[in-house]
Amino acid sequence: MAGLQLRHIRKSFGETHVVRDVDVEVAEGEFLVLVGASGCGKSTLLRMIAGLEVPTEGRILIGGRDVTDVRPRDRDIAMVFQSYALYPHMTVRENMAFGLRVRGAADADVARAVDDAADALELTPLLDRYPRQLSGGQRQRVAMGRAIVRRPRVFLFDEPLSNLDAALRAQMRVELKKLHQKLGVTMIYVTHDQVEAMTLADRILLLQGGRVQQCGPPRELYDWPANRYTASFLGSPGMNFLPARLDGDELQAIGVDLRVDAALLTPEAQNGPVVLGVRPHDFRRKGQAGDGFVAARVDVLEPMGWETHVHLSVANASWVARFDATDAWGLEPGQNVRLFVAPSAIRLFDPATGQALCGPPGDDGAQQAS
Amino acid sequence: MSMPSGAALRRVASFAAALVLGWFCLLIASCVSRVEPDVVVWHSYRGAEASAIQHVVDSFHQLHPDILVEVVPIPYQAYSSKLASAIPRGNGPDVFLFAQERIGAWSASGLIQPVGQDVNDNLLAEIAPPMLEACTWEGELWGLPVAFKNVALFYNRTALSELGGSPPTNTGEMIGLARRFNDPAAGRFGLVYQISDFYFHAPWIFGFGGALVGDDGLPRLSGEELSASLDFVNSLQNDWSLLPRDSGYNVVKDRFATGNALFVIQGPWFLGELTGVDFGVVPLPVVSETGLPARPLLTVESAFLSGHTLPGRRADALAVMEYLAGYDASVLRAVEGRQNPANTRALQDPRVALDPELSPFAQAGLQGVAMPNHPAMQVIWEPANRILEQTLRGDRPRQEILDDAARDLAIALTPPPPPTSPMPWVLLMGALLLSFAVWSVIRARRVGLVARMVEQKWAYLYIAPAAIASGLLIFVPFFTGAAISFFAHENGEFTFVGLSNFVRILTSSDFGFWEPRSFWFTLAVTVLWTLLNVTLHVCIGLALALLLRDPWVRLRGAYRVLLIVPWAVPNYITALIWKSLFNFNFGAINHLLGVFGVPAVDWFSQFSTAFTANLVTNTWLGFPFMMVVSLGALQAIPRDLEDAAEVDGASKWQRFRHITFPLLKPALIPAIVLGSVWTFNMFNIIYLVSEGGPDSSTDILITEAYRWAFQRQEQYGYAAAYGVLIFGVLLLYTRLTTPKKSAEDA
């Protein structure tokens, strides 16, 4: 049985359409990440799942039960907020116990559930403190503890790591993943950070302007983006783009001599203007048989230590290449270089619609797209 | 627009400074170059009377061009206290016009000087003897009568002729005609006047053969004649319903002006209010039972010579006074100012004698009884009014009412406590001040205060204006008031009595512990008042705030503004409006109750209903403040918390109880403390709505303090002691509530 089903969900505020036709089925125990830039509608979507907003159209089903008209507290969900939303006048113990208490649970049950959750999140020494006496990471765990205690059917996370510093964020990502593995509960997670999306998700739902751009496992969105937006969103540094002409399997543009793998082209791909995309990771200093190349001028080098980002000019475009530190050795600003790209690493997009013109081999090159 | 440059700002600032400086110079110059008048005259007239005085002075000036007279009108409410404070300091007038009732007190305190020796005998012969008598005290003439005022009987001429009657000459006739006209259900009343005001009742006392003073010259409220007069008015109101309940001046005016009253008892000031009514005026009728005329109280307005007039100015001042009382000026004042003059020659002048409006009042007045001028007479009003109210309510036996009044009179006439030596107190204060000074110096030395102050002199300069203002406006009056509480005041003199005032108040030596006007009863009423009010304010304010913050309430901007209106309207206006809403006969509330079949309630006749009336009015006034505080505090609660609580499973009520309310408390508690303090001292509502009634039972501590100071023979020391006690109670209250707050903080 599906953990969560969203059927043709739409949401508008007057004339403003915030969510346009989202239709997705989440399996029981799946970790779905809603990702997108600010204002894409992901938080609104999450709030509709929670019941804090009412969809203008569409149905929401949790565990097979239609909950579109059901109040949040009867939907069997728990939510972790970006600001943690801990009750400042209650201790950690009271915060975690609140949900069970207002539902009239027995004291013994409440105490046991709170102790179990505190144990799982290593909060036991903090149980009698007030939120203002906790650090950001501790508060985050209390918020999660408060959600866990109720053993809901669906967990909702609204950008829970946004307020933490980078190191803590990395740590908490791991904690979250472990938690999911341990509890096996359906989790819907909203973030604008693609790293979190990539690392945590079983599936990613990428939204832009209220529309679903692509929905699928992270690997799929990364390797086979269905459109230019998806391609540019995932991956850091982002994919490099250049307008070119496709002629058979050759791509023609100034300073570019590249070839595509014809087996990867979709039926829609035709000779004519296209937008080609190359990920910064796919450049090689030494070419291999079958590789094409781009002629580029090095502008700026960003040595990170373990890798170097090389900012280039290709034709009139600004591109970025990413090399391991050793591979980048010898590159100087102002230098003209040739960088090689394997045909299988090239992605093509329709210049007008942004649709991908490449797909994984097999089937007929069809890919998941909305 | 970009910020103006520093140079431009400096220029503007110096220009403004130059303007202000120039204005100051002009002001000072105008003060200095003012021509000093020879005689300064004060009065509290308005309208036609005031312009008549000005004309009199102008014609005086034509006769005496070398004497410059300045006339200064003073608002009536402030008049007597201004006189009492300005004259001894030499800032007062040389001559002033006032009623004669305070002569006894003023002569004792030296505010006025006798004029009998210096006034022209011919002039004295022209003045009606009863008037001169009224201005005589302890054998001397202290003022020169100028005019007199008294009440008379007004009648609706059209209605009277419809009844086929003529103006009544005795009470039997008057009542007969009134009863024929009377139709309370239709709002028509036979005889409308301010029946529970002693000023209007006095004529009946005289008509039944009674008097206001005993043989010892002290005020008296007892005797068969008084009882007979009380029976008389009781039958007017309760047996024959000749007049509406709660007949205040506005009701009287309204009934007569709309043709719904046959007879009205009022004074000459009423003439100006009547347009469009065909009316006549006759003297009050003779009391049928005794054959004696109902003689009105006479207010004799006189010219007085200030006790501090410099000898060089005395002759000129007397000349002005004589002219004011003389024939020419009296006729002018009668014709223009519509005042009946005390000068009999002027009264006989055809222009006055044949005036259809003035002559009936004159006829009545010449039979009148002048207000006794013994200093103790002022205390008669409160007990006398109380007798009338209780008689008309009919809920107590007559003898009890009269006994209480006699007791009240005795209390009001008690001499102040014996003076005690201030020495122990002076020594104590001196010791305290000295040790405080020493401690301050040591502390300041240790902390290096002077050096720090010099270093931060700009900071101190910035707070200096506010500190000085606070000092002058708050601390100085406070300490002065506290100091006064150790004194007793009589006739302008303060005597040191130590703690006697406090002892008297706290041991409730005059009244039983649980009687109205005792400190403890009043304290209990005040606490109950504060508790109920604040509870209602908070509940209503909070409920409305919760309602108005939901985004789905349309037009909530409009609601918010509308709900601030009760707070924005000055609260004494609110009090007066609500008072009229609670009027027994004409109030909207009784009317509304009638629509639902509930019998009309006499709101101000018992404690519970009068208290409720006050409570309703003050609640209407007070909830917007709590609503605004709650709205602000609610907006400070993050939306997320309520979302989280909702997802956690809390119902609306649970959310309010566990999340919203605890987070509101830090904001509400200071508001509640403030609101309590304001309500505890809410003078306006109590004073104006229930007027402290019935029988001072709804008075709170602060209205009691006011009455002791201004209604019960100026017992300033006693009232100041009340004030100190009020301060003490509130200080204790705020001390008790503050520590609780800091625990909830953060």
Image (cartoon, coloured by chain):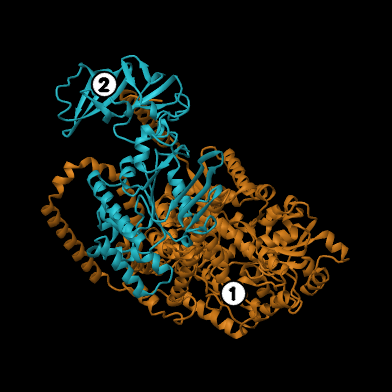
Chain colours: A cyan, B orange
Near-viewer residue (B276 or B232):
B276
Near-viewer residue (A337 or B486):
A337
Residue at (35, 49) in percent of width and height? A82
Q: Quadrant of the rendered structure where residue B630 is?
A: bottom left
Near-viewer residue (B415 or A122):
A122
How busy is the neighbourhood of tag 2: few (under 14 within 10 Å), some, or many (20 plus)? many
Alpha carbons under labels 2 and 1: distance apart: 114 Å
Residue B675 image point, x, y percent: 43, 61
Q: Is residue B319 left or right of residue B599?
A: left
Q: Are marks 2 and 1 on the same chain?
A: no
Q: Chain of mark 1?
A: B
Furthest residue toward top: A254
Q: Is residue B624 at all visible to an observer of this figure?
A: no
For badge 2, the amino acid type reads: Leu
How busy is the neighbourhood of tag 1: few (under 14 within 10 Å), some, or many (20 plus)? many
Name the secondary structure under disc 1. loop
Residue B168 image point, x, y percent: 80, 68
Name the secondary structure under disc 2. strand
Q: Is residue A191 at all visible to an observer of this figure?
A: yes
| Residue A260 versus residue B154 in the image, above or below | above
Q: Quadrant of the rendered structure where residue A194 is?
A: top left
Furthest residue toward left: B446
Q: What label sits on residue A312 in the rendered view?
A: 2
The residue under label 1 is B212
Q: Chain of mark 2?
A: A
Near-viewer residue (B732 or A17):
A17
Residue at (32, 29) in percent of width and height? A345
For badge 1, the amino acid type reads: Leu
| Residue B343 versus residue B598 in the image, above or below | above
The total number of labels drawn is: 2
